[in-house]
Image (spheres, rainbow, N blue to C red):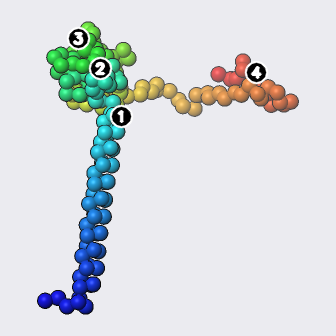
Amino acid sequence: MVSLEQRPNSLFLLLLSLSFLLLLITSTHANSLSVDALDASSSANDPYTCSKDKPCINGACCGSSGHCGFEPAYCGKGCMHNCNATATCGKYAKNPGQGCPLNVCCSEFGFCGTSSEFCDKRCQSNCEQPKPSVEKSDVQKRVIGYWEAWNMDHSCGTMEPGEIPV
């Protein structure tokens, strides 16, 4: 049996436990809401997702899965937007097999570029990452000119553009 002297302490502990439990539940619920809001905002800003109300920002087909692309899975049955879109290059281009305008890599998804995202092992054409070409010449013979028009206002040390030794 609990004496009267112990009851106030028990009641205090019970109230303290309940307030802690309430705080924990509220905190967890608020955390859950912010994670849901973050998920919703990140999918709203994701350039590779789409919906009935949001077409693909890159002009690709919006497939029934809510993702963007040029393959029949996106442009065929269930397509929501841009259903006649074609890739810039590759097998889903307007002219299938078409290469990129500057002879750069055509990615597996039909986009042109020069980075490893475009030129990896799944690349469709021109898959060698372009390397800068350097002429074999004496670097000492290079002339680099820097001319500022406002310098013509100075009383000395001026030079006309035609006087630059190139």
Residue at image mark 4: 160
Determine whether label 3 and label 2 are within 8 Å by CB.
Answer: no
Q: Nearer the viewer, mark 1 or mark 4?
A: 1
Q: Which of marks 3 and 2 is in front?
A: 2
- Given residues 156 and 107, the one toward you in this image is 107
How crowded is the residue under tag 4: few (<14 C-alpha within 10 Å), some, or many (20+)? few
Q: Give the amino acid at mark 2.
A: Ala
Residue 149: name its quadrant. Answer: top right
Q: Give the amino acid at mark 3.
A: Pro
Which label is found at residue 60?
Answer: 2
Q: How many marks?
A: 4
Q: In this view, does 151 lie above or below 7?
A: above
Distance from label 3 to label 2 (Cα)?
16 Å
78 left or right, relative to 24: left
Which label is found at residue 45?
Answer: 1
Q: Which of marks 3 and 2 is nearer the N terminus?
A: 2
Quadrant placement of the N terminus: bottom left
